[in-house]
Image (spheres, grey):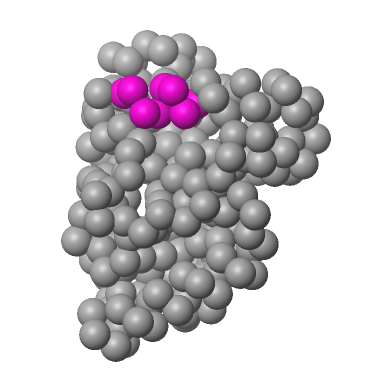
């Protein structure tokens, strides 16, 4: 790895801190930032917009061939759009959250999004990429692979704090998404064999970012 070129893959389940940590890490090391989950949410938003049942895999597979997902990689102001429409807010709504696991499991959706993600990663410079299959599928040759995790209770507490939802309901929904994402046939959520595992249950964001930044420096020095 050179000082100019570096790919950091950050994987893990919902509520493990991936998004916040990845954005701050990218800012700290002067890298671009790619939220792959936002891309699957954008496809889900498009399906709901068009009145397509998220569980209709055939219709979803056709839809993804007709839309354009645009994503910005500035960690300070990441953006996501579909066919020229900004969807940064709508993709975080409960309807998209409830449907995204089903849409993301469609093989053609994953093939399309992974191809786009790899094109973005291939550009010059450093990049921090977060998702569920980065170290195993999207960028298996990443310079640093990290798997963030946290206890189920802590992940539920964080997520309910973000959206103001009932804690018990949030924990149940996270468990549902973990089950679906881990059991799908196409590119399931799993830890890469050579990933550094970091349990963030008892760690603050600053500490996690500091540890990862040190890992990037160590890798660059090799």
| Nearest the eye: 63 or 24 | 24
Q: Does residue 182 sit above or below 141 in this rendering?
A: above
Q: Is residue 11 above or below residue 112?
A: below
Foreground of the two, 168 or 8: 168
Of residues 218 and 111, the one drawn nearer to the viewer in this rendering: 218
Tell me which corner region of the image, top left, top right, bottom left or bottom right, holds residue 206.
bottom right
Q: Main secondary structure of the magenta part?
A: helix
Q: Is residue 26 visible?
A: no
Percent across and percent down for residue 88 are 60, 47
Question: Left or right: where does residue 189 sit relative to residue 78?
Answer: left
Camera-nearest residue between 151 and 61: 151
Q: Is residue 156 visible?
A: yes
- Which residue shows up at 68% across the image and 27% down it? 170
Residue 199 at x, y percent in the picture: 52, 52
Query: The C terminus lies in which quarter of the figure?
Result: bottom left
Q: Is residue 125 left or right of residue 155?
A: left
Please give the range of residues in magenta: 177-184
Left or right: 190 in relation to 213: left
Place residue 156 in its image quadrant: top right
Which quadrant is home to the N terminus? bottom left
- The residue at 70%/43% (across/down) is 158
Please tell me which residue is depicted at 30% across the width and 78% down the height of the picture: 219
Quadrant position of residue 126: bottom left
| Residue at the front extreme, as displayed | 202
User: x, y (%) of residue 201?
Assistant: 61, 50
As for residue 6 lying within the magenta part, the answer is no
Measuring 66% from the left and 35% from the top, which residue is drawn there?
Answer: 153
């Amino acid at each position: 790895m050179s000082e100019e070129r570096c790919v950091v893959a950050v994987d893990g389940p919902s509520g493990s801190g991936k998004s916040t940590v990845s954005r701050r890490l990218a800012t700290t090391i002067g890298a671009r930032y790619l939220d792959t989950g936002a891309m699957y949410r954008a496809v889900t938003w498009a399906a709901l917009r068009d009145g397509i049942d998220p569980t209709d895999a055939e219709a979803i597979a056709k839809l993804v061939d007709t839309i354009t997902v645009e994503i910005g990689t500035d960690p300070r102001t990441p953006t996501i759009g579909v066919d020229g429409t900004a969807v940064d807010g709508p993709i975080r709504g409960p309807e998209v959250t409830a449907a995204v696991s089903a849409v993301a499991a469609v093989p053609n959706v994953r093939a399309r999004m992974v191809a786009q993600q790899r094109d973005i990663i291939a550009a010059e410079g450093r990049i921090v990429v977060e998702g569920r299959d980065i170290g195993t599928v999207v960028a298996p040759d990443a310079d640093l692979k990290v798997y963030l995790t946290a206890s189920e209770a802590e992940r539920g507490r964080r997520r309910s704090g973000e959206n103001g939802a009932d804690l018990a309901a949030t924990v149940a929904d996270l468990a549902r998404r973990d089950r679906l994402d881990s059991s799908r046939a196409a590119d399931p959520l799993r830890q890469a064999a050579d990933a550094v595992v970091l349990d963030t249950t008892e760690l603050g964001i600053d500490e996690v970012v500091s540890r990862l930044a040190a890992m990037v420096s160590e890798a660059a020095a090799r």
